[in-house]
Image (cartoon, rainbow, N blue to C red):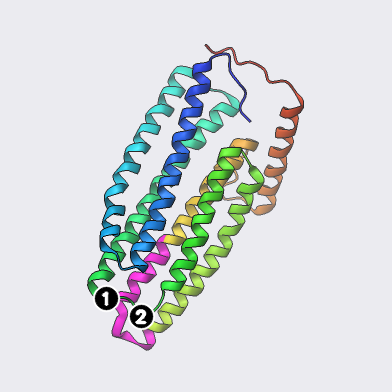
Amino acid sequence: MLNKHTSSSFDQALSDSSSLFLRIGEMATNQVANAVHALIDVDSALAQKVIVRDEEINKMERELDERIMQIVIKRQPTANDFRFVMAMSKGVVDLERIGDEAVKIAKMAQELTKQGEAPLGYSEVQHLSNQVRLMVHNALDAFRNFDAEQAFEVMRSDNVINREYQSASRALLTYIMEDSQHVSKVINILWVLRALERIGDHAKNISELVIYTSSGQDVKHTDYDEVEKAVQDANQKAADQKSEPNDDDPQE
């Protein structure tokens, strides 16, 4: 999707920024996995590692912000380049918030270590965790490959996450109403499920940015028919670009 430029340093700046974005995404996904493991394995030490490591994500986010600012100031990118840079600028916020949700889960894990395990909800947490981590992985993969169709699949899978979250939450709330003995513990599990559902939302946001980069159309708050049209436009643009030679960018 991105043309090569006569300035190799511009290409390198874009490539380095993209690589950093993907590293942040990978770290955030690992944070979620470790936080859930800490919860299920009753591992307070692992939970603390997740909490401490969040600062690494914050530091990398600040570094990417600086790189993006330098690209905009020095290169004044246009068209596809500009959309790509803006997608990274917005998407890194979602990645940082995925890290924040992992910290919330880690804190709930520590709390349950003190209180004792909740009587139920762990299988639902594990299942939802697997699904949302796959969403994030696929959203990052779509970003890496400018794959609008894969991004659209991630968006649609968010509906499944929402339904499963609501179903699991209703079951736990019903349990609380029938047996108040473990209310605080079950509420902690509900907060974990809520954090996982929010991670799915952030993966969806990143996917919307992929479609924006690929098609030039903002698909936030639009129905899926409009999103599908944007995906078709992105595919057509990609096909047209493959059939024509790239124009060199005059920037030096």
- Please name the predominant secondary structure of the magenta segment in the image: helix
What residue appears at the point 63 percent right and 42 percent down from the top-left corner?
Answer: 147
From where the camera sits, is residue 78 visible?
yes
**Viewer-proximal residue, 14 or 46?**
46
Q: Find residue 8 and report its horizontal and vertical position in percent.
A: 53, 16
Looking at the rendered image, the quarter that the N terminus falls into is top right
How many angstroms separate mark 2 from mark 1 (CA)? 9 Å
**What's the residue type where badge 1 is placed?**
Gly
Q: Is residue 149 above or below residue 106?
A: above
Give the labeled residue for mark 1: 116
Q: Is residue 129 above or below residue 208?
A: below
Q: Find residue 137 and report its horizontal and vertical position in percent.
A: 52, 50
**What's the residue type where badge 2 is placed?**
Pro
Q: Is residue 177 above or below residue 225?
A: below
Question: What span is in magenta?
Answer: 177-195
From where the camera sits, is residue 76 visible?
no
Q: Secondary structure at mark 1?
A: loop
Give the labeled residue for mark 2: 119
What residue appears at the point 31 percent right and 75 percent down from the top-left corner?
Answer: 117
What residue appears at the point 59 percent right and 53 percent down from the top-left corner?
Answer: 155
Q: Quadrant of residue 239?
A: top right
Q: Is residue 4 left or right of residue 111?
A: right
Residue most toward the right? 243
**Viewer-proximal residue, 89 or 2?**
2
Q: Find residue 85 and report its horizontal and vertical position in percent.
A: 50, 31
